Image (spheres, helix red, strand yellow):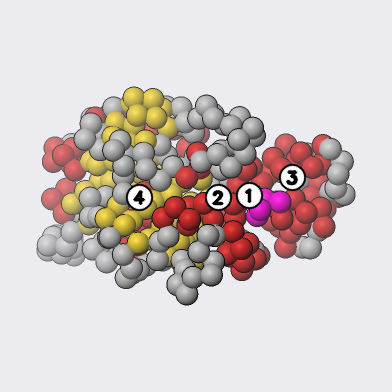
Amino acid sequence: MKNGKDESMEYRVGVDIGGTNLDIGLVDSEYHIIDKQSVETKEVKEPGSMAEYIGSTVCHMLAKCCISAGQIRTIGVGVPGTANLEKGSVEYANNLGFQDVPFVQMIQKNFPGELRRKVLIENDANAAAIGEYLAGGYHVNHFIMITIGTGIGGGIIMNGKLIRGVNGAAGEFGHMSIELSGVACNCGRRGCFEKYASAPALAEQMRAALREESVDGRLVMNLCGGMRDRIDARIVLEAVRRGDPAAIKVFNRYLYYLSEGIANIINILQPDVLVLSGGIMRSGDLFLEKLKEMIHEKIYSRESAVNTWIGQADACKDPGDAGIIGAACIGLL
C-alpha cells in the first residue's frame, strides 16, 4: 500500500480526441472512469500542442490519484481518422487536418520512463465501439456502433473481434455517399453520409431552410438570438422539442438521410445489435422510435423473422465516456 492505494490494482488511461473536445480519463479494471479531464480541441489543435497536453494531463492525473506508472497497463488514444497501429501514426484525419503525423512518437516524448512504452492508438469511433461493447456487457457476436456528432464514424465488431480493415480505415461510415451529386465533402467526395446526417449537417439544413424562406423560423431565430450563424444542432432539437413546425420539417428531412445511411449499413453487415451514440443521441427520446420505423421500411431483410436490434448506446451515463473507456481498452478486442 502507498498513500492508501493498493499497488496491485491496475488501471488504463483513455484519451478520446473528438472534433469538439479532447477528453482524458483514468479507467479501472471494471471499466469505470475514476478521474476525467477535458479541453476544447481547438485549444490544442496542433499535433505538438495536443501531444504535450496529453502527456502533462495524464502525469498530473496519476499523481493526483496516487497511481504509479507500473499500475498503468495502457495509454490508449482514439483519433478521428485513419490510425496506423503498427507505425503509431495518424495517416489521415480530415476533421483535425492531420496527415501522416507520427502521433504516438510525439506523445511518448511527453512521458517519463516506462509510460512511453504503453502508448497505443486507434480510430476514435472504433474505440467508442470497444467501450460500449465492453462496458455495456453486450453478449452478442456481431455488434456495430455508429457515432453521430461533429462527423459520423463507427466501429464494427464481428465474432467478438474489432474489424479494422487492411489499412485500419474500416468503419468510416460517414464517407459512404448517399447523394452521388450532393454536397462536397472535405474527404474529396460528394454526398457523404456525414454531410447530411451529422450534427453540423442538421444545423446547416436549418440555416438553408431559413435562407430560402421556405419555413417560418421565428422560434429558431429567437433561440439563436437572431443570429443564423449561431444555429447548431442543439438549437434545432430544442425547437423540435417545443413543437416548432419549421424545425420539425427540417428535422424530418434529416431523419430521412440518417435512416438511409443506417439501412445501408444493416443491409451490408446484418449485425445482431446496432447502437447509436454521439451528441445527436442526447435527444434520442425525441426521434429514436420514429427513426427505427423508417430504417425498418428500408432494410432488405424487413420480412425476416430475426432482424438487427437497434438502440441507443447506454453503457455510460455520459455517452462520451464510451470513447474514453474504449481508448483505454485498445488491444483487448
Q: Residue at x 47, y 57 (%)?
A: 266
Residue 256 in the figure: left or right of residue 70 = right
Three-letter amino acid code at the position of disc 3: Met
Is there CB contact under 8 Å for labels 1 and 2?
yes
Between circles 1 and 4, the one closer to the viewer is: 1
Which numbered disc flags the more N-terminal residue, 4 or 3? 4
Which numbered disc flags the more N-terminal residue, 2 or 3? 3
Along the viewing direction, whichever of 302 and 148 lies nearer the viewer? 302
Q: Residue furthest top?
A: 100
State the residue position of label 4. Answer: 127
Q: Residue at x 48, y 55 (%)?
A: 267
Quadrant, the C terminus? bottom left
Spot occupied by residue 16 in the image (x, y as percentages of width and height): 39, 46
Residue 285 seen in the figure: no
Rendered position, 317 above or below 163: below
Residue 261's disc number: 2
Residue 209 seen in the figure: yes
Q: Which residues are magenta?
A: 253-258
Mark 2 to mark 3: distance in Å? 20 Å
Mark 1 to mark 2: distance in Å? 6 Å
Quadrant, the N terminus? bottom left
Which numbered disc flags the more N-terminal residue, 3 or 1? 3
Three-letter amino acid code at the position of disc 1: Tyr
Is there CB contact under 8 Å for labels 3 and 1?
no
State the residue position of label 1. Answer: 257
Q: Quadrant of residue 134?
A: bottom left
